[in-house]
Amino acid sequence: SREWHLVARPHGWPKPEDFALREVAVPEPGEGQILVRTIHMSVDPYMRGRMNDVRSYVPPFELDRPMEGGAVGEVVASRSDAFKPGDHVLHGLGWREYAVVGAENAVKVDPELAPLSAYLGVLGMPGLTAYAGLLEVASFKEGDAVFVSGAAGAVGLQVGQIARLKGASRVIGSAGTDEKVKALVEEYGFDAAFNYKNGPVAEQLKEAAPDGIDVYFDNVGGDHLEAAIGALKVHGRATLCGAISGYNDTEPQPGPRNMIAIIGKRLRLQGVLVRDHAAMQPQFVQEVGGWVRSGELKYRETVVHGVEHALDAFLGMLRGENTGKMIVTF
Ligand code: NDP
């Protein structure tokens, strides 16, 4: 069984030498555990933070140990009454071909209901982040004009479409290639979109949302956040979900220069952590699952094949090579 270990803590952009794909014996499940063969694993931006040796809302990856992350697989051996061989489960021990998982840390998933990879994306953690971050944290209401950055990614693509389906007056997105921008408008129903690499974000946002915005869903931080503070209307709300533009920086980014506008406009900027919103899971699965089945909400995956290419997939995601959810299929 092959598994990816972190062997050195990256400084700035991760380098291939910071990781090693190692061959180990297939582990044996103990009492109350299951052995799972990975089918798909997720690569997510937050994993970059776990490579640093800093205390955060998740502990850092340990050196010379397999990395972790969302994965779905097939149970091949079980020493738990809750699972039998052939069951499919979602768990948190990705980055390896075989995982021994405590039964309490595995959730059964149904491949008849949705393709297994969907449980890592549209119906999984990123999907719930979009749903709860927009509807609960940003207190979205019908008629709001919504701007989302990282709009062609897993979370962003869903934020924009949920906003449209819930009656937004205008949905604006930003992304890093002209092709993604075109797809946002032509395939995913955004009213306007722009490529943040083509010019200053503040100017492009002003053009896309001349009347301002009510809600900003921030996936990237940096100059996007500053531009959004400028564009938000009185009593506007922002969900701070991620700040990927700074994840590989070696120095903290400067803050938005227009913080004072928060006072005059009485803005609310609030962070979100998806794990706080587990109570919304049933409502999320029912509503978003319904939209996916009816075709009203489209989702997309960028799939990289082979455990040996998992690191390429992770680094590619950080560089923007994905549209929608980046998935590694073993
Ligand atoms: P994505 O699928 O959006 O993939 C990451 C994307 O980030 C890339 O495709 C790339 O697209 C974009 N990107 C990379 N560098 C930059 C940059 N310098 N400026 C702007 N965009 C950049 O990932 P997710 O949907 O999984 O995650 C999106 C955000 O949400 C991340 O910040 C993540 O940390 C956060 N998140 C937070 C959660 C929470 O609980 N708070 C839970 C899940 C995700 P492009 O081509 O457009 O540059």
Image: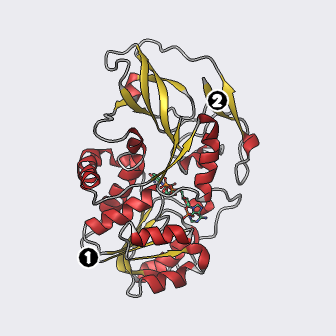
Q: Which mark is residue 65?
A: 2
Residue 174 in sight here: no
Name above or below for residue 314 compared with residue 260: above
Disc 1 is placed on an element classified as loop
Mark 2 C-beta to ligand 1 under 8 Å:
no
Could you tell me residue 190's position as x and y percent? 38, 72
* Residue 88, image quadrant: top left
Could you tell me residue 90's position as x and y percent? 40, 34
> Mark 2 vs mark 1: which is more N-terminal?
2
Which residue is labeled 1 in the image? 143
**Residue at (47% x, 63% y) in the render:** 152
Left or right: where does residue 14 sit relative to residue 162?
Answer: right
**Residue at (40% x, 71% y) in the render:** 186
Q: Nearer the viewer, residue 227 or 148?
A: 148
Could you tell me residue 170's position as x and y percent? 33, 77
Amino acid at circle 2: Arg
Q: Nearer the viewer, residue 225 or 205?
A: 205
Q: CA distance from mark 2 to mark 1?
A: 49 Å
Left or right: where does residue 264 sit relative to residue 168?
Answer: right
**Mark 1 burial class by Cα count in 10 Å: few <14, some 14-19, many 20+:** some
* Residue 109, image quadrant: top left
Q: Which mark is residue 88?
A: none
Residue 155 in sight here: yes
Name above or below for residue 268 compared with residue 46: below
Amino acid at circle 1: Gly
**Residue at (29% x, 77% y) in the render:** 169
Could you tell me residue 245's position as x and y percent? 60, 63
Name above or below for residue 45 compared with residue 201: above
Left or right: where does residue 73 sit relative to residue 21?
Answer: left
